[in-house]
Image (cartoon, rainbow, N blue to C red):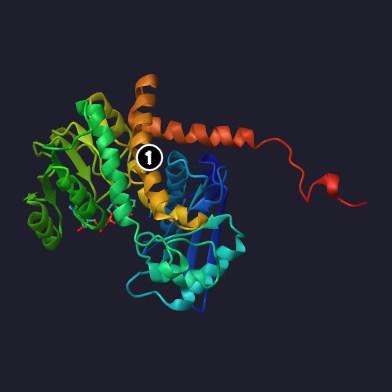
C-alpha cells in the first residue's frame, strides 16, 4: 500500500502508530477528518493477518465514522483505532493505560469508545489516563451499553423507510425478516413485536434463535433462507457485505433496514437495489444511535436528550429519501451527499481569520 497516496486520495488527516513493549500494545489510530470537531470513533481489537491489513481497517473505519457522525448531525469528526491482538487472550491493564496516554497525547483530536473486541472495563482503564474516552462505567457518567440505543434508532429508521415504501410508518402486521438476533437485533425485535409486526429470524447461534422464538413467537429459518422470505422488510443485523450478487436476486422485501455495518458488498449493489425499487435505509445512518448516545457523554450524559436525538434518525432517513428523489440518486449516495455537504458548509464557515494567542498580531516584539 502506498500510504501517503492512499491517505491523500481519501483526504485522511493523520495516522498514529503506537507501540508499548511492556504491555504489548500495538495500536493504530486513524483520524480521517476533523472539520466538524474532534474525531470520535471506537477502538477495535482484532487479530489481523498482517500490519497492512490492520492499517487499512483503521483507515476504512475512520472514514466511515466521519460520514456517520456528519450525517447524524454531530459536531464531531471521524476516527477509529485498531489494536492488534486477540481480545480474549492478549489484553492486560497496562495495555489500555498505555493506549490512554497515547490518546491524551493527541490533546483532544481523537476521542475513543467501545467497538468490536473492547468493553466498558477497557474504557475505564483508558479513562485512568485521559478524559478523551466515552462508554466508561456509570460511576463516571457513562451512557452504558450502546446496543439497546442503536436498536431504538434502527426501529425509528425502519419506520421512516416503511413510510417511504408503503405510505404509512406503521409496522403492525408487517412481516420482517431479521438476520442475526444478537445484542442490537434482540431489542429491535422487542420494539417490532410490541408494534404488532410478524417476525422471521435466523442466526448461527441456535440459543439466540430460540430466545426470539420464545419471546416474540418469531418463525425460525435457516441462515441461507432468510433472503428469500416473503417479507415486507429485510433487517440485516449480523454481517457486512450481505447485499451482493448472490442475495439480491433472492430478495422479496421492499425495504432493507437493519443495524449491520457495510451492508452493500460494493457500491454497485446499492445502484442495483435502487433500480429494483427497493427502499434502502443507509447502514451508517440507521445504525448511528450508539454513537449519538456515547457522544452525549461529552456534554454530561442525559438519557432523555440522547434518546430524543436518536429518535431523529427517522427525520434523517426521510431527508435522505428526499435527496435521493430530488437528485435521482440511490439512497446510499444521498447519505454520502448529506454528510459531505454538511462538512463542506462548516469548512467554509470556519475559513475566516480568527485572532488567537498564536496569531502574528499578538506576538510581542
Ligand atoms: N452494538 C452496537 O451498538 C452497534 C452499533 C452500530 C452498528 N452495529 C452493527 O450491528 C451488527 C450487530 O451488532 P451486535 O452488537 O448486535 O452484534 P452481536 O454479535 O451481538 O450480534 C450479531 C449476531 O449475528 C449472528 N450471526 C453471525 N453470523 C451470522 C450469519 N451468517 N447468519 C446469521 N446470523 C449470524 C451472531 O451469532 C450474533 O447473534 C454488527 O454488524 C455491528 O457492527 C452495532
Ligand atoms: C463510538 C461507537 C459507539 C461506535 C460504534 N462502534 C459504531 O460503529 O457506530
> Ligand 1 is located in which of the four quadrants?
bottom left
Badge count: 1
Name the residue at the front extreme.
304
Residue for badge 1: 312
Q: Position of residue 346 (x, y in %)?
A: 58, 36
Kindly tell me whether residue 243 is visible in this rendering: yes
Q: Residues within 10 Å of mark 1 (few under 14, many from 20)?
A: some
In this orientation, which residue lies closer to the viewer: 252 or 281?
281
Q: Measuring 58% from the left and 65% from the top, which residue is drawn there?
A: 104
User: Is 172 on the left-hand or right-hand side of 298?
Assistant: left
Kindly tell me whether residue 41 is visible in this rendering: no
User: Is 284 on the left-hand or right-hand side of 254?
Assistant: right
Look at the numbered disc 1 and say if its residue's Cβ is closer than 8 Å to ligand 2: no
In this orientation, which residue lies closer to the viewer: 149 or 219?
149
Name the residue at the bottom extreme.
22
Q: Measuring 83% from the left and 45% from the top, which residue is drawn there?
A: 360
User: Is 154 on the left-hand or right-hand side of 174?
Assistant: right
In this orientation, which residue lies closer to the viewer: 16 or 159?
159
Q: Position of residue 332 (x, y in %)?
A: 35, 33
Quadrant of the rendered image containing residue 53: bottom left
Q: Position of residue 241 (x, y in %)?
A: 27, 44
Quadrant of the rendered image containing residue 273: top left
In this orientation, which residue lies closer to the viewer: 306 or 30?
306
Find numbered disc 1 in the image and state the secondary structure of the residue it sits on.
loop
Q: Measuring 67% from the left and 36% from the top, which residue is drawn there?
A: 351
Q: Measuring 15% from the left and 57% from the top, which residue is drawn there?
A: 204
Above or below, comparing residue 31 to residue 132 in the picture: above
Amino acid at each position: 500500500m502506498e500510504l501517503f497516496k492512499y491517505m491523500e486520495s481519501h483526504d485522511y488527516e493523520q495516522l498514529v502508530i503506537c507501540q508499548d513493549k511492556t504491555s504489548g500494545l500495538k495500536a493504530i489510530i486513524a483520524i480521517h477528518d476533523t472539520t466538524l470537531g474532534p474525531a470520535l470513533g471506537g477502538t477495535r481489537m482484532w487479530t489481523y493477518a498482517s500490519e497492512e491489513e490492520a492499517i487499512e481497517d483503521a483507515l476504512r473505519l475512520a472514514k466511515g465514522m466521519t460520514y456517520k457522525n456528519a450525517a447524524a448531525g454531530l459536531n464531531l469528526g471521524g476516527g477509529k483505532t485498531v489494536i492488534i491482538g486477540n481480545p480474549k487472550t492478549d489484553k492486560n491493564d497496562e495495555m489500555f493505560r498505555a493506549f490512554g496516554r497515547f490518546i491524551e497525547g493527541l490533546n483532544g483530536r481523537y476521542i475513543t469508545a467501545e467497538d468490536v473486541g473492547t468493553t466498558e472495563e477497557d474504557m475505564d482503564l483508558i479513562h485512568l489516563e485521559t478524559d478523551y474516552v466515552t462508554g466508561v462505567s456509570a460511576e463516571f457518567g457513562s451512557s452504558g451499553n450502546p446496543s439497546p440505543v442503536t436498536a431504538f434508532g434502527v426501529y425509528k429508521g425502519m419506520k421512516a423507510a416503511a413510510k417511504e415504501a408503503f405510505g404509512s410508518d406503521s409496522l403492525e402486521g408487517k412481516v420482517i425478516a431479521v438476520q442475526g438476533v444478537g445484542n442490537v437485533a434482540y431489542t429491535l425485535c422487542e420494539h417490532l413485536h410490541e408494534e404488532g409486526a410478524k417476525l422471521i429470524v435466523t442466526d448461527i447461534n441456535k440459543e439466540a434463535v430460540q430466545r426470539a422464538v420464545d419471546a416474540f413467537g418469531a418463525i425460525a429459518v435457516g441462515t441461507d433462507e432468510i433472503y428469500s422470505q416473503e417479507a415486507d422488510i429485510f433487517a440485516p443485523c449480523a454481517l457486512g457485505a450481505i447485499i451482493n450478487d448472490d442475495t439480491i436476486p433472492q430478495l422479496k422485501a421492499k425495504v432493507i433496514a437493519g443495524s449491520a455495518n457495510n451492508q452493500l458488498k460494493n457500491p454497485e449493489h446499492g445502484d442495483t437495489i435502487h433500480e429494483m425499487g427497493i427502499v434502502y435505509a443507509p447502514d451508517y445512518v440507521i445504525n448511528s444511535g450508539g454513537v449519538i448516545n456515547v457522544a452525549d457523554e461529552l456534554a454530561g450524559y442525559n438519557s432523555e436528550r440522547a434518546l430524543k436525538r436518536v429518535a431523529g434518525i427517522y427525520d434523517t432517513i426521510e431527508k435522505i429519501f428526499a435527496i435521493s428523489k430530488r437528485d435521482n440518486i440511490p439512497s446510499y449516495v444521498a447519505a454520502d451527499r448529506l454528510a459531505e455537504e454538511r462538512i463542506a458548509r462548516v469548512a467554509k464557515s470556519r475559513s475566516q481569520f480568527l485572532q488567537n494567542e498564536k496569531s502574528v498580531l499578538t506576538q510581542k516584539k
